[in-house]
Amino acid sequence: MTIGKSSDRENTPSSVEPTDDAVQAADAPSIGRVLSAARIDAGLTVDQVSTATRVRVPIVHAIEEDDFDRCGGDFYARGHIRAVAQAVGADGEALVARYDAAHGGSPASKRPATQLIDNGPIKVPGRSRPNWAAAMVAAIVAVVALIGFNLVSGKSGHGTTGSASAPLPSGSGTGSVAPVTPTVQPPAPAPSAAAIAAVPADKVTVKLVAEGTSWVSAMDGSGKSLFQNNISDGQDQTFTDPKQIRLVLGNGGAVHAYVNGKDLGVLGKDGQVVHVTYTPGDPQAG
């Protein structure tokens, strides 16, 4: 009787099929293509992204071509990816996670266990302000003490036959020295914002005052460009149109806005790209 041999297929390990995540990762566009597409959708040029992020134009081009060697290392590459993504409206954290997965993991996964101990935040001493109320109270107490001392001294020197005399200035006799009341100057009030002139009710008027450096683009209601440039600390620009003013700010935390005579404060956070449109009337309704 011939004993059948087991098939070689039973001893051969089955091939591993790729997972759905691996297929999706292979089919997904690269980091550079995602950033390039987002920039084009936002209507920004490479020069505008470079101005808003302070990342040099050649490096922005290199990132969009997935050439991260120009960044100068993983640390700078992550920072450039986040900055460019924020400027063009892409998900920076997701792109950084993809970068870490392709370059050996995030910095936290590479640190030794001894570096993971949280020592708490480092407190940096700030500039303390003078306590004017405490200084005034201390000065008043000192003056009262001196006056009381002079009154007691005057009574003890003249006995019971006369009243206490007023203290004489120094050098005018043998009387006590008159106390000098210290002059405490209150802190000078902070300068107020410049008054906004009255604006026509049938137009929209936008005044931007820089509290740092930001790239600004302004267009009127017909789509005509009114301004495209940087404004620095202390500089201002004013735009007026019958229909609307559309703004794009590269750094919303550095721009203070006055719209239709109303103070709206800064228009965003530091480094935040802001798109906003204003029309005549209440700026909140614009």
Image (cartoon, helix red, strand yellow):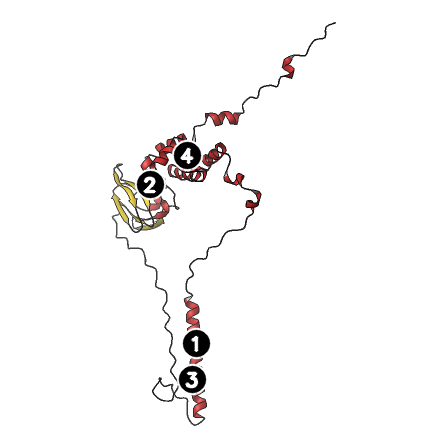
Dot 2: element = helix
Decide which of tag 3 and tag 1 comes sooner along the chain. 1
Three-letter amino acid code at the position of disc 4:
Asp
How much space separates mark 1 and mark 4, taking CA atoms?
Answer: 69 Å
**Few, some or many C-alpha atoms within 10 Å of disc 1 (few <14, some 14-19, many ≥20)?**
some
Of all residues, the one furthest to the right in this rendering is 1
Quarter of the picture containing the C terminus is top left
Residue 278 in sight here: no
How far across and down, in percent of the image, does residue 53 sit?
36, 41
Q: Secondary structure at mark 1?
A: helix
**The disc label shown at residue 69, or none:** 4
Give the amino acid type for the residue marked by disc 1 in the picture.
Ala
Of the image marks 4 and 3, the number of the one nearer the N terminus: 4
Q: Could you tell me if residue 9 is visible in this image?
A: yes
Q: Residue lying at the far top in this picture: please name it.
A: 1
Which residue position is annotated with label 3?
Answer: 150
How far is the residue under mark 1 from the one under mark 2?
59 Å
Q: Is residue 206 above or below residue 45?
A: below
Residue 184 vertical position relative to residue 78 in the rendered view, above or below: below
Tell me the number on the disc at residue 142. 1
Mark 4 vs mark 3, foreground winner is 4
User: Mark 2 against mark 3, which lies toward the viewer?
Assistant: 2
Examine the image and state in which quarter residue 4 appears.
top right
Residue underneath mark 2: 51
For disc 3, the neighbor class at 10 Å (few under 14, some 14 to 19, many from 20) is many
Q: CA distance from mark 4 to mark 2?
A: 21 Å
Q: Are marks 1 and 4 in contact (CB under 8 Å)?
A: no
- Residue 104: x and y in percent read 50, 34
Give the residue type at disc 3.
Asn
Q: Are marks 2 and 3 in contact (CB under 8 Å)?
A: no
